[in-house]
Amino acid sequence: MRLVDFSAAPDAALQQINKWVDQETDGKIKEVMPPGSIDPDTRMVLANTVYFKAAWQEAFVKKLTQDAPFTLLDGTQVQVPTMKTDGGIPVRMGAGEGYQALALPYKGDLAEMVILMPDAGEFDSFESRLDAGKYAAILDGLRPNTLTLFMPKFEFTADINLKPVLSGLGMPLAFDRDRADFSNMTQAERLYVQQALHKAYVLVDEQGTKAAAVSIVIMMPASAMPNELHIDRPFIFVIRDAATGTILFVGRVLNPLEK
């Protein structure tokens, strides 16, 4: 809990929050709250961050990284820096109707990256059908295998307005000025959630993965297994805790060159 003066010094409070986020994410997210997002009517800001850094269990060999084609959703190809393992590495993988899946472990087997690569032309339909049940079935179908992996390097930052997302998930009243009820937090005045912001950063390279995210809430009044796998078209990735299955990050890579 930190006390700040939103009423008399909203800009100073904004800078303090952004500085805290910068420190907690090891400099990966420097500004989650844009100028003007706090004003004298602000009563409370809830902020939480997560920072993830892990090395691959079997690192890619940097000298083997070279440009290779990556097919975009519209069928055009771009040349992207593509990593390669030095021979076969142990993974878990599987395939089903319209997709291939791979679980790539981080050192210590404490976490892993799950890659879901839909077949060419199937990305939109696969993504629209991907729910908790489908995701769990894909994980259950992964089997140990050894292969040479070709995978693009990528790095990007994503800004997301969580207001429509959270409303769609079942909490629209929190954003309703007239019907929101936060009386268990304070009865001095009625509060409602004015903004909910999320920003995430992900870097995947030869050594491993660095990822960071921050969420801000502002309150106011089965196929044969190949020996090689080329991740050369749009894919979905999930960074998950191996022991509990907790999803730490989830995203999609449509073009590894875009940041």
Image: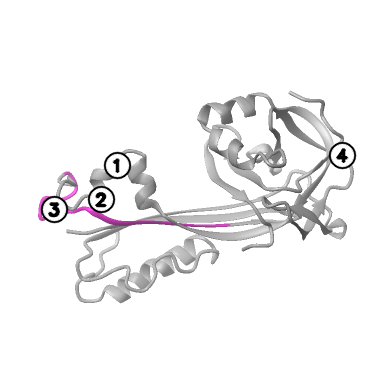
Q: Residue at x 64, y 52 (%)?
A: 254
| Between marks 3 and 1 in the image, the one whose residue lies nearer the viewer | 1
Residue reaching furthest to the right: 87
Q: What is the three-letter code of the residue carrying label 4? A: Gly
Q: Examine the structure image and report whether residue 80 is included in the region drawn in magenta.
A: no
User: What's the distance in space between the residues labelled 3 and 1, CA to CA?
Assistant: 17 Å
Residue 201 sits in quarter = bottom right
- Image marks 3 and 1: residues in contact by CB distance under 8 Å: no
- Image marks 2 and 1: residues in contact by CB distance under 8 Å: yes
| Between marks 4 and 1 in the image, the one whose residue lies nearer the viewer | 1
Question: Which residue is label 3 attached to?
Answer: 190
The magenta stretch is 184-201
User: What's the distance in space between the residues labelled 4 and 1, CA to CA?
Assistant: 47 Å
Q: Earlier in the sequence, mark 2 or mark 4?
A: 4
Question: Which residue is label 2 attached to?
Answer: 175
Q: Earlier in the sequence, mark 4 or mark 1?
A: 4
| Between marks 2 and 4 in the image, the one whose residue lies nearer the viewer | 2
Mark 2: which secondary structure?
Answer: helix
134 vs 236: above or below: above
33 vs 70: above or below: below
User: What's the distance in space between the residues labelled 3 and 4, CA to CA?
Assistant: 60 Å
Mark 1: which secondary structure?
Answer: loop
24 vs 91: above or below: below
Question: Which residue is label 1 attached to?
Answer: 171
Nearer to me, 21 or 215: 215
